[in-house]
């Protein structure tokens, strides 16, 4: 994969104007990639040139709607392309997330990019290779089946002097070939009938190729969305109320008269923003502007307990029954013992390091947007709708922001920038402030999960009923984002469902029901508790509940937690294997929990949890120390085993897993959005702490390679078992069962003393 | 607006800026630097850190006026992809980032640490970087990269 041939940095040096590099590369690649015209849905996927262009020097440019979110996924996609085309990795350039150049492959999310987007690019590459071999066959006067390709050079088997390079075969010209493509987004099937390489022959896929984006990120040469600057650009900031999107009844501009460089106060419907010549002037003006908001249209709940009561007592609008086996009622009535417990999960932040940022340039009925969105086409369409112009008139160019973990599927900053740019007729850059992001991040929803199990006299689980009650993602799936809402757009759906995995369906219990209920949002409209998908959405909380509960049963029956699980996992070899491997690597010795009570202040324990997230299998053992006098939990080590099918880049995958584990520790131990009826109360990193260096556990990871399987997701499955493993370890250490996250010292201490 | 003289990465620069503006905005918007990044504007996360006269400072909270007559080094001042500083090289070798947004603070923080303590223990590293947030969870790789850089300079 190559970013050097026409790198943005070199252009930046030679021209001094960053925007030139965007449009320069745009012209080059558009000329190569012009398909049958840009449709509303991006480039036509049935035109091979929409996907791949080959330059005279043999450089392969791949046009993809998938984007790098800091996970290394674009490096992995480039490996897949290089492998299938038989070109050197450093000859592949990924042109990513440009709505005028790419096929819409759906949002980059849910750890689905390698699983779904990978085969799309692999098959497009296989189709390209097939065409190149046809061309070579004519030029070399040889049958296709007698040709071989090495590093982008086609030669005749047994006669290597008869050869021609991809660049000489096609360089600078179009393929002009139709391929098949059906379905849309993630589900698009691209040229499925074209034979792809046998994974046994892989040389590039499966290697830990270093990430292409990282060197520039270590030197300050990388251009993030926050670094985009265009000529004549102004800076904007939106001003929003604390509790709900009420309307401004009065805007007093007198307080900003003395701030030099203020260009305009933008008011449109309920939207208020300021635009200024410098970023600092915009920030000062946004702080100083006196906005009187109308009486809030929504009342914030008084605190988390009110939310949990609401979740418990409100009728669902949709029940997703994902397992319904046997007959629960008679099984429960026959049970020797019935267990029941409820688990609570709070609203949590995505917590992006860099608040969202975008630059918009709206001129008449056209708009150009540079943004860090996870869904370039989704943001393009949202902006088109908001500005009431056709989607094809909006050109969105992806520029990476900071890690987003789902948050940038809702690209609010791009809408703010577009609205303010339209108002001033110039390009406007908007970067949210920290308090904006903490307050208005569409949060991971609160969840309330109840589990009931019946055990017979021999200690067999004969009944299992899991019910998760959760909010849908109100800011997702085409529902209006903040600026759109403020100028009058209304939600069209109750929101996208918060998943249904992790409710114990990995186990085969004789009578079993797993249900994820979607509870209608408390009140219609936008407020700081709006919701969206947060890494491994829903599953993290559900696995916390189901895997804690399994431990509760095992402990009550006096059975070792690993042995207890294996008994009911017997039908799935892959998940049994990750569990046994984890136990072995963690030096697990079979005994029931809790551990024999310790005499001192410090108590040590170990806990296990297993999960299946979108067919990726994971098991983790957590080792913790609990200070019984303070309630402070220290996670000493996490041992984890991961099976996600074929592995494209082992080190990249390990990097993701380490990150999932560490973020999992953070979400388990300390993360909770606090609020009262006046609004959200933790609006910075001191009041919403995340894990820091002193709290980082040791990590041991084993990857189980499955070269015969297709590649599956690695971006989020491994966070899923972490909370439950820690909860089970705290129980093992102290005998205290934590059923509500986060496990803050106060909560642990209260549970210890209960 | 005022003419402010700064010394950034060994070069004398004069900028036309509000002297009360935090240094971060002047570095990014007036001087076009990308190393120091806006993360919180509150001095809590470390993404904006620069070296001022040998000490790490949060450029999002100090006024530009306070940086006059001081020597300021940003991430760009350490090295480039073509000529990386040993720390930057070590971060590449350890693939010690995910999104990379926090990397400015991590590498600047590590530089200040290694300048004072050429052979830090893991505990020293954790302690001195505890004031820097990484949300993606690259902490263990960052620690390894700093150890690698310390070892490579020991051999040199």
Image: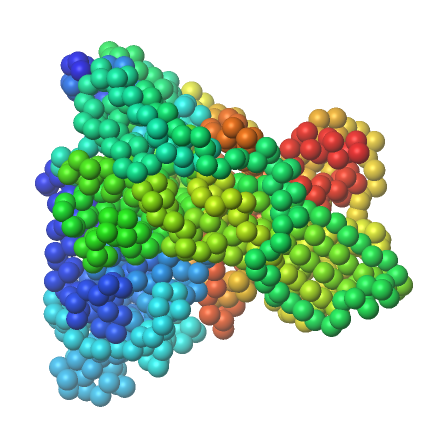
Q: Residue at x 17, y 74 (%)?
A: A175
Q: Quadrant of the N terminus of chain B?
A: top left
Residue A667 seen in the figure: yes
Quarter assignment of residue B58: top left
Q: Residue at x 44, y 60 (%)?
A: A112
Q: Residue at x 28, y 17 (%)?
A: A255
Q: Is residue A529 left or right of residue A286?
A: right
| Residue A159 pos. (x, y %) | 21, 82
Q: Is residue A280 above or below residue A379?
A: above
Quarter assignment of residue A307: top right
| Residue A157 pos. (x, y %) | 25, 82
Q: Is residue A423 above or below residue A476?
A: above
Asked whether A317 or A355 is in front, the reply is A317
Q: Is residue A365 left or right of residue A547?
A: left
Name the colour scheme.
rainbow
| Residue A303 pos. (x, y %) | 60, 34
Asked whether B57 or B116 is in front, the reply is B57
Q: Residue furthest left?
A: A15
Q: Is residue A58 left or right of residue B39?
A: left
Residue A443 seen in the figure: no
């Amino acid at each position: 994969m190559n970013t050097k041939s026409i790198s943005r940095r070199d252009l930046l040096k030679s021209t001094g104007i960053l925007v030139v590099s965007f449009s320069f590369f745009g012209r080059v690649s558009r000329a190569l990639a012009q398909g049958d015209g840009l449709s509303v849905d991006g480039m036509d996927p049935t035109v091979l040139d929409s996907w791949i262009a080959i330059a005279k020097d043999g450089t392969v440019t791949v046009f993809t709607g998938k984007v790098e979110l800091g996970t290394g996924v674009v490096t992995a996609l480039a490996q897949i392309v290089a492998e299938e085309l038989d070109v050197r990795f450093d000859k592949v350039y990924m042109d990513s997330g440009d709505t005028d150049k790419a096929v819409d492959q759906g949002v980059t999310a849910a750890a689905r990019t390698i699983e779904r987007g990978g085969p799309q690019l692999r098959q497009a590459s296989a189709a390209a290779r097939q065409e190149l071999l046809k061309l070579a066959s004519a030029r070399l006067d040889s049958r296709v089946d007698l040709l071989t390709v090495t590093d982008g050079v086609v030669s005749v088997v047994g006669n290597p002097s008869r050869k021609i390079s991809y660049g000489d075969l096609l360089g600078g010209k179009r393929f002009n070939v139709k391929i098949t493509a059906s379905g849309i987004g993630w589900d698009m099937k691209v040229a499925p009938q074209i034979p792809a390489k046998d994974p046994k022959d892989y040389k590039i896929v499966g290697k830990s190729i270093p990430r292409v984006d990282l060197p520039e990120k270590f030197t300050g040469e990388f251009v993030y969305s926050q670094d985009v600057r265009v000529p004549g650009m102004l800076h904007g900031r939106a001003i929003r109320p604390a509790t709900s999107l009420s309307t401004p009844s009065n805007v007093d501009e007198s307080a900003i008269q003395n701030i030099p460089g203020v260009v305009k106060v933008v008011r449109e419907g309920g939207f208020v923003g300021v635009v200024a010549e410098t970023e600092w002037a915009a920030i000062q003006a946004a702080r100083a502007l006196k906005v009187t908001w109308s009486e809030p249209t929504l009342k914030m709940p008084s605190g988390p307990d009110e939310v949990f009561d609401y979740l418990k007592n409100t009728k669902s609008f949709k029940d997703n029954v994902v397992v319904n086996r046997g007959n629960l009622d008679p099984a429960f009535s026959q049970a020797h013992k019935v267990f029941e417990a409820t688990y609570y999960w709070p609203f949590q932040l995505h917590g992006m390091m860099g608040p969202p940022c975008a630059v918009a340039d709206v001129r008449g009925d056209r708009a150009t947007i540079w943004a860090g969105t996870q869904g370039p086409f989704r943001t393009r369409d949202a902006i088109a709708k908001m500005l009431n112009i056709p989607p094809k008139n909006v050109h969105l160019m992806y520029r990476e922001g900071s890690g987003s973990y789902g948050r940038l599927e809702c690209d609010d900053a791009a809408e703010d920038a577009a609205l303010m740019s339209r108002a001033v007729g110039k390009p406007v850059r908007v970067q949210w402030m920290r308090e904006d992001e903490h307050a208005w991040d569409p949060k991971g929803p609160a969840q309330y999960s109840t589990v009931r199990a019946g055990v017979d006299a021999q200690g067999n689980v004969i009944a299992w009923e899991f019910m998760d009650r959760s909010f849908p993602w109100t800011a997702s799936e085409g529902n209006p984002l903040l600026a759109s809402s403020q100028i009058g757009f209304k939600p069209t759906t109750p929101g996208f469902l918060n998943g249904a995995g992790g409710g114990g369906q990995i186990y085969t219990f004789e009578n079993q029901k797993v249900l994820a209920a979607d509870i209608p949002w408390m009140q219609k409209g936008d407020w700081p508790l709006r919701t969206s998908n947060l890494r491994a959405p829903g599953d993290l909380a559900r696995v916390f509940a189901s895997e804690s509960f399994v431990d509760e049963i095992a402990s009550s029956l006096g059975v070792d937690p690993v042995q207890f699980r294996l008994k009911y996992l017997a039908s799935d070899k892959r998940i049994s294997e990750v569990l046994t491997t984890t136990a072995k690597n963690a030096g697990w010795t079979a005994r029931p929990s809790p551990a024999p009570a310790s005499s001192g202040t410090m108590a040590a324990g170990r806990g296990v949890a297993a999960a299946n997230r979108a067919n990726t299998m994971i098991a983790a053992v957590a080792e913790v120390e609990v200070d019984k006098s303070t309630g402070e939990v220290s996670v000493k080590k996490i041992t984890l085993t991961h099976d996600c099918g074929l592995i494209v880049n082992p080190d990249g995958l390990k990097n993701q897993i380490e990150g999932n584990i560490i973020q999992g520790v953070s979400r388990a131990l300390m993360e909770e959005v606090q609020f009262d009826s006046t609004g959200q109360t933790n609006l910075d990193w001191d009041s919403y702490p995340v894990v820091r260096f002193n709290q980082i556990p040791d990590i041991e990871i084993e990857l189980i390679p499955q070269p015969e399987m297709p590649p599956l997701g690695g971006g989020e499955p491994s966070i899923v078992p972490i909370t439950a493993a820690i909860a089970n370890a705290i129980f093992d250490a102290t005998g205290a069962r934590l059923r509500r996250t986060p496990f803050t010292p106060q909560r642990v201490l209260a549970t210890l003393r209960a | 607006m005022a003419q402010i003289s700064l010394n950034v990465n060994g070069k004398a620069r004069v900028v036309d800026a509000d002297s009360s503006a935090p240094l971060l905005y002047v570095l990014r918007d007036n001087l076009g630097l990308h190393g120091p990044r806006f993360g919180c504007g509150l001095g809590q996360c470390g993404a904006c850190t620069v070296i001022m006269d040998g000490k790490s400072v949060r450029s999002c909270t100090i006024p530009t006026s306070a940086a006059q007559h001081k020597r300021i080094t940003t991430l760009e001042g350490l090295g480039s992809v073509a000529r990386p500083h040993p720390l930057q090289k070590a971060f590449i070798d350890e693939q010690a980032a995910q999104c990379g947004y926090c990397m400015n603070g991590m590498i600047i923080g590590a530089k200040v640490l290694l300048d004072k303590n050429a052979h830090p223990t893991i505990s020293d590293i954790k302690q001195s970087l505890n004031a820097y947030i990484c949300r993606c969870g690259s902490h263990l790789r960052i620690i390894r990269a700093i150890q690698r850089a310390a070892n490579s300079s020991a051999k040199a």
